Image (tube, grey):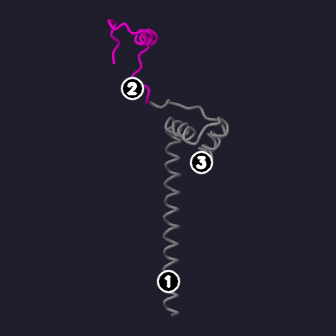
């Protein structure tokens, strides 16, 4: 709602005079900071591919909640293209290992099932 100078309410006058020199758009409020400075230990953990360790360090050193610490780490990763590429590669490797583990477990379960059926 725009301030109407003809409207003489005290709240409108105080609010408009306090904010008269500032222009804040909705997009400015929703944008994350471009670069978050992280503790050195958190940055080292990220370069080693340890995202959870970096979040833990940020939480402990800055006394933040999980969501805030994760947000700061994500902003930092987004501001560092080389680090983002490395983290994407680490994530892909972890996903491949998980898929291989699940396939191995399924093969083992199928083998045990066949063995049990053969014995009976």
Q: Secondary structure at mark 3?
A: helix
x and y percent of residue 97 in the render?
A: 53, 62
* Nearest to N terminus: mark 2 or mark 3: 2
Residue at 52%, 77% (x, y): give it.
Answer: 108
Identify the residue position indicated by label 3 in the image.
52
x and y percent of residue 1 in the render?
A: 34, 19
Q: Residues within 10 Å of mark 1 (few under 14, many from 20)?
A: few
x and y percent of residue 74 in the render?
A: 52, 40
Q: Secondary structure at mark 2?
A: helix
Identify the residue position indicated by label 2 in the image.
26
* Nearest to N terminus: mark 1 or mark 3: 3
Q: CA distance from mark 1 to mark 3?
A: 37 Å
Closer mark to the observer between disc 2 and disc 3: 2
Query: Residue 31 in magenta?
Result: no
Q: Are marks 2 and 3 in contact (CB under 8 Å)?
A: no
Specify start and end residues of the magenta stretch as a single range.
Answer: 1-30
Q: CA distance from mark 2 to mark 3?
A: 32 Å
Q: In the figure, 113 relative to 87: above or below?
A: below
Q: How many marks?
A: 3
Q: Residue furthest front?
A: 9
Identify the residue position indicated by label 1 in the image.
113
Q: CA distance from mark 2 to mark 1?
A: 60 Å
Q: Are marks 2 and 1 in contact (CB under 8 Å)?
A: no
Q: Is residue 5 left or right of residue 102?
A: left
x and y percent of residue 55 in the render?
A: 60, 43
């Amino acid at each position: 709602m725009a301030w109407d100078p003809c409207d003489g309410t005290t709240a409108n006058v105080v609010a408009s005079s306090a904010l008269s020199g500032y222009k804040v758009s909705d997009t400015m409020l929703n944008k994350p900071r471009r670069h978050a400075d992280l503790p050195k230990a958190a940055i080292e953990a990220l370069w080693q591919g340890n995202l959870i360790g970096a979040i833990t360090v940020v939480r402990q050193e800055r006394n933040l909640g999980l969501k805030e610490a994760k947000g700061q780490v994500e902003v930092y990763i987004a501001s560092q293209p080389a680090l983002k590429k490395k983290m994407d590669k680490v994530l892909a490797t972890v996903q491949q290992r998980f898929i291989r583990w699940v396939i191995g477990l399924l093969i083992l379960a199928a083998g045990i099932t066949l063995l049990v059926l053969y014995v009976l």
